Amino acid sequence: MKKINIKRILPFLCTLLAFSACKVESENIFNMFDDVKVTFHNNSEYAIVEDAVVNDGDSVHIYFTITSEREDMMAIVVDSTNGTGTYSQREILTTESERRSYSGVRKFKMQRDGKMTFRFYAKNDKNVYIGDGYTSITVEGAPSYTLFPDRRLYAPVEGEDYPSFLSLSSGKTYSYSQAATVSEEIDFGIDTIFDSRANYSTFLVYNLYALTVDKYPVEFYDVSNWTKRETKFSAPITASNAYTTFTRTLVSSSRIEEQASNQAIDREQTDGLEYTQGLAAASMIYFQTPEGKYGAIYVNQATRDQQGRYYVSMDIKIQK
């Protein structure tokens, strides 16, 4: 029989006995924040107490009470996030009488399509998170505008029938022959000229025009018998923040109207003479349809496809 070497296993036995003799107290990660509770209250006609869907422009009130059984709450944090990946935080320092129970309200007008999620959590005297009641509340703005992404309009070419007309109500693009059969739906077409500057004479300039223009810019198209929709446009906006405005500011019907109303929307066409004007990449144009709907066009790029055809790509937002 093989003999057991006591000297070799003695350290292991000592360690085992130490663990057996000493019970280490530690908090369970699954319930260590159970003493903090959050409750929502129905304190007004605009109050919500659970996840809800609201319309653009609706008032929203979130009344809440956060309590802590075990330790003082030195600060309450209201954390909100939305579908664009942005978030905001507001930290509220509590008074001595509010350390174990704090009540407040978050009020706002819904001016964003999509979801916003709110969390209410507490921090102790070490500025450490101590719980949010394992709860949150999500407010979803019902769709109030329509987005038409990557609509491509091609430079008109005599003898060809490329899509160079667009309906803002449907987001559909049409060639000349197609548009002739649905002219009552057409809001604008595009035309091109070469850059007026000698050093850029091979660069195309893209402009848009409504069918109500006095002088039709594409001489080989006959639109004399078409229905003329009286859609109006602003001058192109080439500010460096145009993309941010389009994606982060124009996030609901009311926000689109607010921004568009600040512009002079009185043009039937753009009149760019250089490739950085008119429908230039990274520019934006506001519009208003004959029905009174506001919207915006953001130009993604002016380029060529694999067949060598010139076109502009644009994203469009329009009120429902």
Image: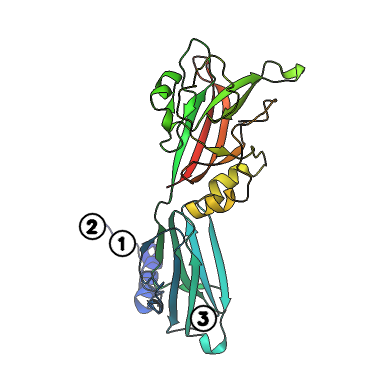
Coloring basis for residues? rainbow
Residue 261 can be seen in this image: yes
Q: Residues under labels 1 and 2: Cα distance?
A: 9 Å
Check residue 184 in the rendering and tell me which mark sits there, or answer none.
Answer: none
Residue at which label 2 appears: 1
Query: Which residue is most to the bottom?
Result: 97
Q: Secondary structure at mark 1?
A: loop
Q: Label 1 amino acid?
A: Ile
User: Does 262 appear above or below 220?
Assistant: below
Mark 3–mark 2 distance (CA, rounded to whole Å)? 66 Å
Residue at the (50%, 39%) spot, across then down: 316
Left or right of residue 9: residue 84: right
Counting residues from the start of the chain, the first of labels 1 and 3 encountered is 1
Which residue matches tag 1? 4
Q: Residues within 10 Å of mark 2 (few under 14, many from 20)?
A: few
Residue ranking furthest to the left:
1
Badge 3: residue crowd in 10 Å (few <14, some 14–19, many ≥20): many
Q: Does 7 sit above or below residue 290?
A: below
Looking at the image, is 140 positioned above or below residue 277?
A: below
Above or below residue 49? Residue 184 is above
Q: Earlier in the sequence, mark 3 or mark 2?
A: 2
Q: CA distance from mark 1 to mark 3?
A: 58 Å
Q: Amino acid at mark 2?
A: Met
Label drawn at residue 73:
3
